Amino acid sequence: MKYFLSLLLTFSIYAFSQEDEPSREPAPGVTQLTVVKVKTNYIQDYLDGLEKTWVAANKIQQEMGLIDGYNVHVGNNSYVYLTINYPNYASLDPWTDEQQAEFEEKFRQVISEDDQTARAQGYEDIREIVRVEMVNRIIFN
């Protein structure tokens, strides 16, 4: 009986000491997902505006090393999905004054402040921001 109990204890300790390899893990980085509902027949107008504002701004941020990338996805249901990929959550911290000044200088070469304001106000007539989420990608091993 003592032999059986010591054998049982040995195997139970061995079983608890082995760690299972996790079947999944978070991927590096974080993605900001913005879901936008665009009025019917205005997708092209909205995409034209995005190209001059949102896409241009994200190109600059990527060149500055502030983001890893960005994408625009269009659904067949009048929804547009905008994603910005950040290296980590710390990348969402407020910009320094130097970063802000550098971005502003580069962005003003692309679009004037008046044009930007006019486009942004025009968006309100053709789209509704449904939600903004921070999402993490999961890697399955």
Image (tube, rainbow, N blue to C red):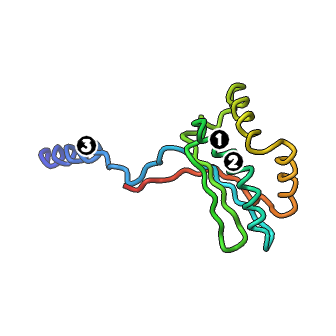
Q: Earlier in the sequence, mark 3 or mark 1?
A: 3
- Other-residue count near label 3 (Cα within 10 Å), few / some / many at <14 / 14–19 / ≥20: few
**Residue at screen point 64% across, 54% down:** 33
* In-front residue for pair 1/135: 135
* In-front residue for pair 118/31: 118
* Quarter placement of the C terminus: bottom left
Amino acid type of disc 1?
Answer: Ile
Q: Earlier in the sequence, mark 2 or mark 3?
A: 3
Amino acid type of disc 3?
Answer: Ile
- Other-residue count near label 2 (Cα within 10 Å), few / some / many at <14 / 14–19 / ≥20: some
Decide: marks 2, 1 in contact (CB < 8 A)?
yes
Q: CA distance from mark 2 to mark 3?
A: 59 Å
**Secondary structure type for disc 3:** helix
**Residue at screen point 74% across, 67% down:** 44
Q: CA distance from mark 3 to mark 1?
A: 56 Å
Residue that mark 2 sits on:
56
**Secondary structure type for disc 1:** helix
- Other-residue count near label 1 (Cα within 10 Å), few / some / many at <14 / 14–19 / ≥20: some
Amino acid type of disc 2?
Answer: Ala
Q: CA distance from mark 2 to mark 1?
A: 6 Å
Residue that mark 3 sits on:
13
* In-front residue for pair 140/13: 140
Residue that mark 1 sits on:
60
Residue 18 position in % (x across, y down): 27, 45
